[in-house]
Structure formats: C-alpha cells, structure tokens
C-alpha cells in the first residue's frame, strides 16, 4: 500500500518536474531563446520606464508594474508552451470559425467598444474586467484563415475570380473594420498580408492593383496634411467633432507634424517624437546605464509605444541595435521553418505570423527614430503587458507548433532511412 502511494507521489512529482517540462518543450530552440531574451529585456525596460509613474499612482510602491509584467510574462510563456504542444493542423480546422467570430467582434468594437484617445479599439472582458483590442484577435484569425485559403487554392491561385478574390476579401474586410479606430494597425496588417500573398504565388499584377487602390486614400491623407499646413501655417487644433471626424483630424495632424516637424499637433505626436529624440541623443553609443533614464518622466507611453527610446537611452545605440538583431534572427528562423515545412498550410502560417510580428517591431522602432509618423503599435514581447502581449505569445506558440511538427517529420524520415539501410 505504501509502495503504491510512493509510486503515485513520484509520478506526480515528475509531472511538475522542471526537467520533465523541458523534455516536452519542442520546436525551434533558437526562437525559445529569443523569447526568453526579449522578456528579460522587457522586465528591465518596463521597470525603468514605469518607476516614476508607479511611485506617483501607488504612493511609493515602484514595483507594482514590475510584478504585473512578471505575471504577464509567466502567463505568456504558458500560452506559448501549451500552444506549441497542439498539432498545427488544429489551427487549420479552427481558422474559419475564429475568423468568422472576429468579424462581428470588430463591428461591435467599432460602434460599442471602449473609447480611448478618440478611438474605439477595445472591448471590456466580463468577470476579469480587462480591456482587449479585438484587432489582436482579428490579426491572428486572419493569418490562420489566409494560410488555409492559400494552401487550398495553389492550383488556381493565378486566376482572378477563383484564386485572388477569395483570398483578398478577408484581408480587405478586416483592414476596413480596423482602420477607423487604428489606421496604423490596418496598414501594417495589410502590408503583411500582401507580402504573404506574394510568397503564396498570387499574381503580381493583382497585388500591384490592390496596392494602387490602397494608395488612393493615403495620397488623399497626405495631400490634406500638405494643404492644411500651407493654408493655416500651423497645425489645426483638435476638432470639436466626434468619432471618425476626430480620427481623420488625428491622422492628418500626425502626417503634418511628421512632414513639417511642427512643434504641436492634435494628440501630442510631435511632442512624443521630440522627447524620443532627446532620449536617443542622451543614450549615445552605450547609454546612461540601466534605470538611469530621465526622459521617462516626460515621454508619454514610455513603457508602451515608445519603450524603444528608453532602451536606447539606457543601453545606447548598441543596445538598440541588439534588439533589432534579435527580431531579425527571429524572422530568419521563421523563414527557415517555412522552407523546411513539407505542408503548405504550416509553412504559410508560420511565415505570415512572423511577418506581422517583425513588421510591427520595425514600425515601432521606426516611429521612435522618426522614420514613420506616430502610430499606436507596441514593441512585441517588450512593451508592457496586456492582452496584446498574450496574443503575441499565442502567435509565437503557433509558430513553434509548426516547428515542432517539422522536427517530428524530419526525425521520422531519418529513422525510416536508417531502418532501410539496416
């Protein structure tokens, strides 16, 4: 009786044993290492960027945001772990359902969502009382659905009606629903999808036609910014309107301040970029050291959209280049998975998700150094946690699920070859 109890106890102990957990961790080990690196950078950067804010809001408790970030990181790593254990073919089966669920959620968010900064991007989740950007779910759902469509229509992908239209309408619908509240996310998502379509052998002339149509509203937006600047001589103050009118004013103001370097705009975008430049100038080559940032007290969203500026200030251009290198290695490893994957769905899924994460990272860094107008995109796995952080982890977990399947397929092939030789 006692021996049986000891055996059961040992089995239970092995279940929670760290070594046992690592033995079940498969997929690309380099990607796992990059995730750990980025989360460690996140802890340092978020703790530094939120110290003053936490002291002000929580009566001297400067660690409150650090503990929250630790909780999000632990939750995110668990999401990655369990998502990578799921066979990626399951995501193909779930793709249509998740995509069809995301569309009404985007509609609901657009008209009834939680409004912040004149944009309705969030819905409030019941019970846990957290807000969630439905665009994060929609991005993940779109790439799952797009990978499924591309894998099924390779034989007719060059045909306009049978190949191009079925794969472009989900992209167009999703981007149109996201754009009113979050134009930058819609543009980045559209660019990522078109890149995936190009690799998926969609006709180049069809892709160029889509880019041409998408450029029309962008050209109008840029023209409006130029005309307003020339007619007024300065940036117009915030409109007294509401909804889409205010968002259009915001877009024009951001483009205007980006082109002309004005000192003031509708929502403080020029002020943010000015403070980011100050942080970069202070950082120099090797930075002022961890926790020694002073710009964090003046830079809005220092822990979120502009966290890259704090990293450069504290760790210098060398630290900023290292972060960029990590994302490039991540993209390279995902391209490697794409080349090795024998099945079209898995290959397109891994590549599409890696594109959107890499492009988001590049856009965030480009905004910080004033190469792009101010956007609302975060630095993946580094910016302060939220539901966006969890969805990023889910995307990485799905990529690792594909990598795990590739490893298993190659291992089985090698074992079969070895057996035949014997």
Image (cartoon, rainbow, N blue to C red):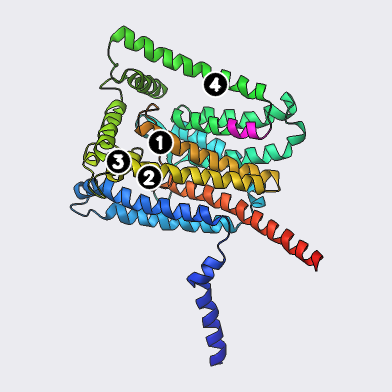
In the image, is 113 to the left or to the right of 144?
A: left
Q: Earlier in the sequence, mark 3 or mark 1?
A: 3
Residue that mark 2 sits on: 383
Give the mark, 3 or 2, whose residue is nearer the N terminus.
3
User: Is label 4 in contact with label 2 (beta carbons under 8 Å)?
Assistant: no
Distance (Cα) linking label 4 and label 3: 39 Å
* Prevailing secondary structure class for the magenta stretch in the rendered image: helix
Pointer 3 and pointer 2: residues touching (CB < 8 Å)?
A: no
Per the image, the residue denoted by label 3 is: 285
Q: Residue at x 26, y 22 (%)?
A: 264
Q: Residues within 10 Å of mark 1 (few under 14, many from 20)?
A: many
Name the residue carrying label 4. Answer: 214
Rounded to the nearest angstrom, the CA distance separating label 2 from label 1 is 10 Å
* Quadrant containing the C terminus in the rendered view: bottom right
x then y, percent, for residue 119: 39, 30
Proximity of marks 2 and 1: CB atoms separated by less than 8 Å: yes
In front: label 3 or label 2 = 3
């Amino acid at each position: 009786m006692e021996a049986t109890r000891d055996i059961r106890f040992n089995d239970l102990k092995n279940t929670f044993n760290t070594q046992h957990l690592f033995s079940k961790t498969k997929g690309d080990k380099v990607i796992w290492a990059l995730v750990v690196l980025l989360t460690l950078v996140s802890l340092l950067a978020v703790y530094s960027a939120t110290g003053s804010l936490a002291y002000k809001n929580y009566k001297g408790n400067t660690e409150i945001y650090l503990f929250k970030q630790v909780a999000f990181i632990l939750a995110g790593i668990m999401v990655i772990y369990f998502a990578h254990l799921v066979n990626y073919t399951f995501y193909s089966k779930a793709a249509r359902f998740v995509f069809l669920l995301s569309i009404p959620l985007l509609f609901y968010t657009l008209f009834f969502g939680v409004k912040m900064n004149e944009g309705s991007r969030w819905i409030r989740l019941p019970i846990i009382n957290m807000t969630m950007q439905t665009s994060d779910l929609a991005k993940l759902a779109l790439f799952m659905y797009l990978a499924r469509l591309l894998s099924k229509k390779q034989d007719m992908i060059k045909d306009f009606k049978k190949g191009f239209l079925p794969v472009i309408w989900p992209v167009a619908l999703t981007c149109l629903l996201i754009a009113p509240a979050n134009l930058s996310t819609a543009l980045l998502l559209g660019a990522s999808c078109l890149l995936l379509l190009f690799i998926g052998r969609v006709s180049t002339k069809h892709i160029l036609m889509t880019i041409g149509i998408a450029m029309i509203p962008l050209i109008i937006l840029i023209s409006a910014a130029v005309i307003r600047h020339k007619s007024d001589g300065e940036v117009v103050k915030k409109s007294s309107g509401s909804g889409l009118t205010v968002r259009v004013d915001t877009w024009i103001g951001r483009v205007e301040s980006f082109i002309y370097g004005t000192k003031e705009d509708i929502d403080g975008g020029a002020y943010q970029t000015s403070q980011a430049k100050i942080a970069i100038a202070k950082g120099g080559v090797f930075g002022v050291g961890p926790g020694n940032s002073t710009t964090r007290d003046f830079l809005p969203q220092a822990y979120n959209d502009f966290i890259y500026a704090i990293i450069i200030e504290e760790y210098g251009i060398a630290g900023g280049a290292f972060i960029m290198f990590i994302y490039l290695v991540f993209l390279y490893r995902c391209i490697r998975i794409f080349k090795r994957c024998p099945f079209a769905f898995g290959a397109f899924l891994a590549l599409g998700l890696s594109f959107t994460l890499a492009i988001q990272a590049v856009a965030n860094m480009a905004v910080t150094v004033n190469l792009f107008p101010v956007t609302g995109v975060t630095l993946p796995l580094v910016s302060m946690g939220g539901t966006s952080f969890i969805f990023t982890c889910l995307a990485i977990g799905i990529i690792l699920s594909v990598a795990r399947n590739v490893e298993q397929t190659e291992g089985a092939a090698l074992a079969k070859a070895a057996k035949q030789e014997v």
